[in-house]
Image (cartoon, rainbow, N blue to C red):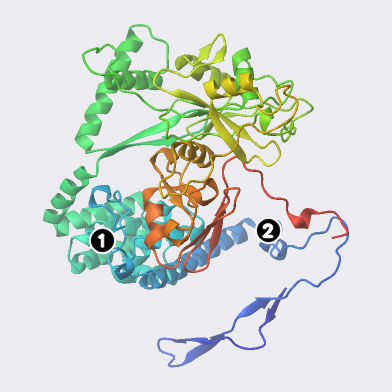
Amino acid sequence: MLVTAPKVSDPVRRFAHVFEGGGFGVGVTVTSLDVAPWPEEVLPPGVVARPTRLGEMLPVASRTDAEIAAELQRIQQMEARLAAYTVELVTEMSARRPDTLDRQIGEPGAASPDWAPGPGLEPAPGVSEFFADELAMILNCSRTAATKLADTAALLTQRLPVTWAALADGQLDWPRARALAAELMDPARDVEPQVIAEVEAAVLPRANRLSIRGLQAAARAELLRLDAGAADRRRKQAERGADVTLRPERDGMAELSVFLPHPMAATIHQTLDHYARLAKVAGDDHPLGQLRVGVLYDLVTRPWDTSRAPVTAHVTVLARLDTLHAAAAGHDACATAHLPSDHLRADPPSAAANPTDEPGAGAGCPPAAGGDGCGRVEPAEVDGQPITAAHLRELLEQLDALCPGGLQAPAGGNLTIALTDPVSGALRATVTRAELERLARRGCPDHPAGDCGCPLLDRPPPVDRYRHTPAQERFLTTRDRTCRHPGCHNKAAWADLDHVLPHADGGETACENLCCLCRRHHRLKTHAPGWSFTMAPDGTLTVTTPSGITRVTRPPGLAEPDDPDDEPPPF
């Protein structure tokens, strides 16, 4: 239900359009519309209050094919206009976040030139380096996506005004406007504005007749024609941005992406394909793609070459004890009980870890969500990606971490056990296998009979100094696993342990006041004006942006708090 606001909010926006030849205009006054509040009354059982959906106001089943097609085109026009409005909003907010408030090179807390952001992540000239982080919090997206949006907005409003106008008028769709901006983003940094304007004038009139890839190719060709020298400079600069990146995928797979000059890429692919086809001719019945991957792996790792020092790859494996028992049994069968949980870590001591259950932390575990009386086997994790118990067994065997006595630390790695509260999931303590065995043999020093229930382990105590202890580091990297800033997934192994309440302001060096933050977000918290960080004793971190947007992150495994709205009546 929409009702007109009793007062017109300032500023009232008026639009006028003068029709050619007619000599007259039409004025439109736009006022704000407020959603009428839902009446304070008890709803019938099974009835919930929610906004009316467009498909309920505009039933789609009653439309003809032609009407549906026309409606889809109208929606596309509205999306274009909304995108243009979004661009305006982002541009205005970026102007309110100048880089004059950032730490400059040479000042404490300034970004190190050696750790400059990768291609496409640099802030726009004159804009704070942390604006993308704020925009990511506002839109609840990644910093990379926020950076691309901010750069696109700046380019459209400053260097491609005709493209932005076509977008705002619904004459050009957002995917094409965004693609054209992406193609001209890097060239706009090192060519004259007139060149960009000429490219826009050449390709925009035919943009709607071209595919997105065709539009980008046309813009690229115009750039080469107008300024070949700049194109050669960009090609040399692009070669410096060559890199190899890793992205996890589903079903235990990952994508290894290589960004490099085209001739090198073509040579590598042809080499892989050639050796894979030779193996196929020799009788190997594996798919050709899998053979290419095998050739790549062998050529890179060179298992036959013993003349070089071995390279160790660090993999973090996290598993509950019931999952480990299922893996040891060689199947994914349902566990007969929710056993204590364990944590295997084939990583350096500072790497991330997983909180798991152990009887000393409290009573038995509750049934797994969605399971029956015996519960379902929870997935394990490899570098944050879920895997099955069968997959876990394969990995443990490859790491040589299975032994007759159960688990052992793999060569070059270690085995850590994390003890969590069985109800809240909060991490209670971390301990090595040897430490746990010693505690089990010794028992409670005050009650040798062993039936007292006294706690033998807890989180590391606070220390009266700035620097944290190794025990605190192990506990906190186990609790947090990654940088705790909302949306950041940098590993805790590469993070700083930061005082949420600064030590200089009286903040304790205690687990309740320390959390993992990557170096970028450590600098943001410490030096970016207007940001607020607070943390609850259970590790729940609340972050608020200068614009008032608040996001909350919770340690992995920590149970969600009860929603008071879910309480049964009387409320």
Q: How many numbered marks does the figure carry?
A: 2
| Front in this rendered view, residue 107 or 86 | 107
- Give the class, few, some or many, for how many residues have Cα within 10 Å of label 2's Cα (few <14, many ≥20): few
| Front in this rendered view, residue 315 or 49 | 315
Q: Position of residue 103 (x, y in %)?
A: 30, 63
Instruction: State whether residue 399 is above or below residue 118.
Output: above
Q: Position of residue 1 (x, y in %)?
A: 72, 73
Instruction: State whether residue 436 is above or below residue 524.
Output: above
Instruction: Farthest residue to the top: give it.
Output: 283
Instruction: State whether residue 255 is above or below residue 103.
Output: above
Instruction: State whether residue 399 is above or below residue 554.
Output: above
- Whole-Å distance between the Cαs marked 1 and 2? 60 Å
| Front in this rendered view, residue 424 or 547 | 424
User: Looking at the picture, which amino acid does disc 2 mark?
Assistant: Val
Residue 119: assigned label: none
Dot 1: element: loop
Query: Quick check: can you spot residue 451?
Result: yes
User: Quadrant of the rendered structure where residue 535 is?
Assistant: bottom right
User: Quadrant of the rendered structure where residue 202 is?
Assistant: bottom left
Q: Position of residue 147 (x, y in %)?
A: 38, 57
Dot 2: element: loop
Residue 60: assigned label: 2
User: Quadrant of the rendered structure where residue 125 is?
Assistant: bottom left
Residue carrying label 1: 107
Query: Quick check: can you spot residue 208?
Result: no
Q: Which residue is rendered at x = 21% and y = 38% of the image? A: 261
User: Looking at the picture, which amino acid does disc 1 mark?
Assistant: Glu
